[in-house]
Image (cartoon, rainbow, N blue to C red):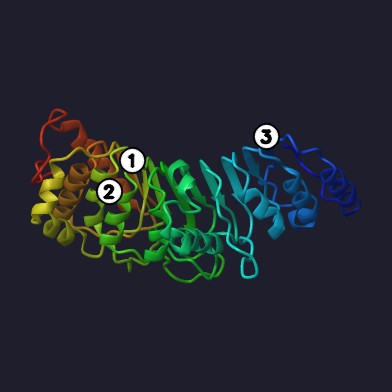
Amino acid sequence: MQGNFETLPNLLPAIASAISIIPTSTLQLLFVDHSNRGVPWAYFNDPFSSVALRCGPLLTEFTSPVPLSDTAVNHLIHLPHLRTWRVEGPPPRYSASPLPHVFPPLIKFTLAQGAACGWLSLLRCLEHGDSSTHSTTPLSKVKESLECLKVEELDLLGPTIDVSFAVTIKIFRNLAHLDVGAFCYEKGRGRCIFKLKNNDVVALAMALAQLESLLLGYPCFENTCATTVACLLPISVYCVKLRKLEIHFNTTNIVGDLRNSSGDPRFQELLLLPRCPLSCLEVFQIPLTLDEPGFGIVVNWMVNIFPSLKSCEGVEDIWFDISDRITILQAMRIPPGASLAGGAFDFPFI
């Protein structure tokens, strides 16, 4: 189902009535364009809940901006061939009924506005509840099948991108795309929401080795996060397919952090391993202050960490300067396959 609904009040009952009688028992795909913000989607809760409840086992996609009843959502959870699902709002309340025994083998799962906190909590409960003592859990299938998890907007009061968030995500080891679309200062949220430490990021990268894109919210200007550039090399090594990266990292002492890391034997060992083909590092609002020698150190090591890097995309002008110098360095680099370990490019003019 695709199209635009008129939103004149006198048409809403007729539209709702038409939706309610759509034959869906053999439906394979239901898609409603959710880009039109002017449509009062909540008005269609009952009609679309009725549609969902009448969908049968042939359904493979349910993408809708309409919040559904608990009964309708619970019905969709039990459909055996559902592969693509966008949910709006929190999950069903299971306080008075048992948790679902199965979860569909989704390939793409999108948590829309107001959905993230409740659904992530449910996933943790399903994975680590009493059923986890058995050979299979309710999430056994989706843990193997899920390739794309998208969080369109983190809830205003939570969750933050923290250890609890990462622990939940790590169970989906075949994820190729993790996209958390969150601004730290969006809609009255006056704080940095990125609470991971370097070790947490490393553990996430090791668990999700199939990642091609890792977008952990838009990096903000606070520069208070506990992550540093030291977490970037493990990401590059453990996620060798990675082509898109967006992550907070603290630049207050970026030169010192790089120097300290380069003296770590584990860091040097990682530099001998293949790294990802990332060409653009998304830094968004991350601030950066460098003197001239600092430019050379940062540029050299960014290319060491990401050998295919072409640019660092941020709002501050200094990132454009970094990108220009990366271009110069890449043009002068040694042939592919030669070692980049130890800061091989110490050109005085960079």
Left or right of 213: which side holds 117? right
Tell which residue pokes out farthest to the front in this image.
Answer: 134
Give the alpha-carbon distance from disc 1 to disc 2, as whole Å. Answer: 8 Å
Q: Amino acid at mark 2?
A: Ile
* Front: mark 3 or 2: 3
Give the alpha-carbon distance from disc 3 to disc 2, as whole Å. Answer: 38 Å
> Is the residue under label 2 in contact with that under label 3 (CB below 8 Å)?
no
| 3 or 1: tag closer to the N-terminus | 3
In the rendered structure, find residue 64 and report the number of the disc placed on it: none
Q: Residue at x 69, y 56 (%)?
A: 67
Residue matched to label 2: 235
Q: Quadrant of residue 285?
A: bottom left
- Neighbor class of circle 2 (other Cα within 10 Å; few <14, some 14-19, many 20+) is many
Q: Residue at x 14, y 44 (%)?
A: 271
Residue at disc 2, secondary structure: helix
Residue matched to label 3: 28
Residue 329 position within the rendered picture, expressed as x and y whole percent measured from the top left = 19, 37
Q: Amino acid at mark 1?
A: Leu
